[in-house]
Image: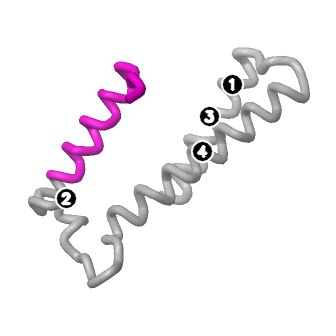
């Protein structure tokens, strides 16, 4: 059996807590669950995670292709992201 790191232990504990909350229906968004389907809450969480994964892949690719981003470039991108979040909220 391989040893797992502390970060993985924390992630597993967080997943278990979230699952317990969903099962206990403490999250109002998680109550609408059809047979064989995910709730809207879980579906959105999965979509959001995929967005974050893809953004991470994009950042890694950009950094491989060129120089690391400057603090100013990061600040501009973050401001744009917040603007998009407000627009699409």
Comes first in the chain, label 4 or label 2: 2
Quick one: SS at disc 1? helix
The Cα atoms of the two marked residues, 4 and 2, are separated by 23 Å
The x and y percentages for residue 71 are: 70, 15
Is 81 in the magenta?
Answer: no
Comes first in the chain, label 1 or label 2: 2
**Nearer the camera: disc 4 or disc 3:** 4
Comes first in the chain, label 4 or label 3: 4
Quick one: SS at disc 4? helix
**Nearer the camera: disc 1 or disc 4:** 4
Quick one: 21 or 67, which is closer to the camera? Answer: 21
Quick one: SS at disc 2? helix
Residue drawn 15% across and 61% down? 23
Residue drawn 23% across and 76% down? 32
Q: Are marks 4 and 3 in contact (CB under 8 Å)?
A: no
**Nearer the camera: disc 1 or disc 2:** 2
The Cα atoms of the two marked residues, 1 and 4, are separated by 18 Å
The Cα atoms of the two marked residues, 3 and 1, are separated by 9 Å
Any mark on residue 53, and which? Answer: 4
Residue drawn 11% across and 57% down? 26
Whether residue 44 sits left or right of residue 51 in the image: it is left
Any mark on residue 22, and which? Answer: 2
Any mark on residue 74, and which? Answer: 1
25 shown above or below 9: below
Question: Where are the magenta residues, as a range?
Answer: 1-20
Crowding near pointer 3: few (<14 within 10 Å), some, many (20+)? Answer: few
């Amino acid at each position: 059996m391989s040893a797992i790191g502390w970060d993985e232990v924390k992630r597993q504990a967080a997943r278990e807590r979230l699952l317990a909350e969903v099962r206990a229906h403490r999250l109002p968004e998680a109550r609408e669950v059809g047979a064989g389907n995910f709730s809207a809450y879980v579906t959105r969480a999965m979509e959001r995670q995929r967005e974050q994964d893809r953004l991470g892949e994009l950042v890694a690719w950009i950094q491989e292709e060129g120089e690391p981003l400057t603090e100013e470039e990061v600040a501009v991108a973050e401001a744009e992201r917040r603007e998009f979040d407000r627009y699409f909220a």
